[in-house]
Image: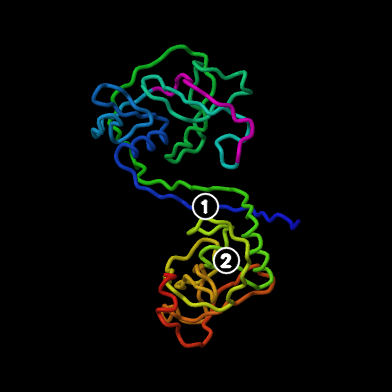
Amino acid sequence: MPDVLSAPLVVEFPFTRSLGPVQSAFLTGLRERTVLGVRTGDGRVLVPPVEYDPVTAEELRELTEVATTGTVTTWAWNPAPRRDQPLATPFAWVLVRLDGADTALLHVLDAPGPEAVNTGMRVRIRWAPQRTGAITDIACFEPYESEATAESTPHSGEFADPVTGIVTPARLDYTYTPGRAQSAYLNALAEQRTVGERCPSCRKVYVPPRGACPTCGVATAEQVEVGPRGTVTTYCIVNIKAKNLDIEVPYVYAHIALDGADLALHGRIGGIPYDQVRMGLRVEPVWTEGARHPDHYRPTGEPDADYDAYKELL
């Protein structure tokens, strides 16, 4: 039996958003060790604050300050913290209803073990030493013995140098294991060959193969070597340089229908000025030493393909 292929993959991007008056006041308040909520038309205080009432959709602007102490309403123990989580040691995820609020805030509780956590326990905010106007300005919650509670008080929401935007990193780490069809495809690429699989019903050849025909829904097993040459069907010009990608912009990324394939795959076009790439351009792969896939595709010098030859692959 062939070795099962697997590889660690990371999908990561920074999510940037501007803040309206409510969220701006909330995050700026955290920087100043102040927790703000927003009052609804029926008198409830929502923390974290929202800009519109989740029940009536009424716009909300009446800010109110709540306490930095509260009560745990529910919790779950995390015995093995992951990268970039708030604490490096085991902790509890908790929903905390701060004194003066009617809803609960999700954060973490620093506790020695799950036996030290219970619904109804009293906690208080532990502030981060350095605060920038983000939810991480609350380093965590910690147990707090006081039974005293506090009412919310009106707040203008005005601070010096308010936070007007945030950048939130989004990241997904996972291990990818291809199935039989894609493993054969990847192993062939390591030999500078491209293989697809033919559907036994409609006879279409799919590259990369998925192990089943997306049209007929039947399993595919017959391997077919395609290419190496192909035709540009559609393309786009990339003008924004990607992080950690050493390719100068602008460059062209295209759909390429390899000869013998009934599905176009993605590839970068090189060896030609970006503004000379066109639909119907005939291309071939360029391999670099030790690579498991083509670095890019370049023009073959052949006449352009007739539109009718690839129009069904657009």
Residue 177 in the image, given as x and y percentages of width and height: 64, 52
Q: Report the residue that reaches farthest toward the right.
A: 1
Q: Which mark is residue 198?
A: 2
Q: Residues within 10 Å of mark 2 (few under 14, many from 20)?
A: many
Give 281 or 107, whichever is nearer the viewer: 281
Q: Which residues are magenta?
A: 67-82
249 within the magenta span: no
Q: Label for residue 34?
A: none
Residue 10 position in % (x across, y down) = 57, 52
**Mark 2 is on which residue type?**
Arg
Tell whether 299 sits left or right of 183.
Answer: left
Query: Is residue 237 shown to the viewer in this render?
Result: no
Identify which residue, 112 or 181, lies in the foreground: 181
SS category of the residue bearing label 1: strand
Residue 78 magenta-drawn? yes
Look at the picture and state if 49 lies above or below 281.
Answer: above
Which image quarter: residue 288? bottom right
Q: Check the image and report above or below for 63 versus 19.
A: above
Residue at point 51%, 65% (across, down): 202
Q: Which mark is residue 12?
A: 1
In this view, the residue in front, 72 or 225, is 225
Looking at this view, name the residue that lies furthest to the top: 147
- Secondary structure state at the residue bearing disc 2: strand
What predominant SS class does the magenta segment belong to?
strand
Camera-side residue: 241 or 140? Answer: 241
Instruction: Indicate the amino acid at tag 1.
Output: Glu
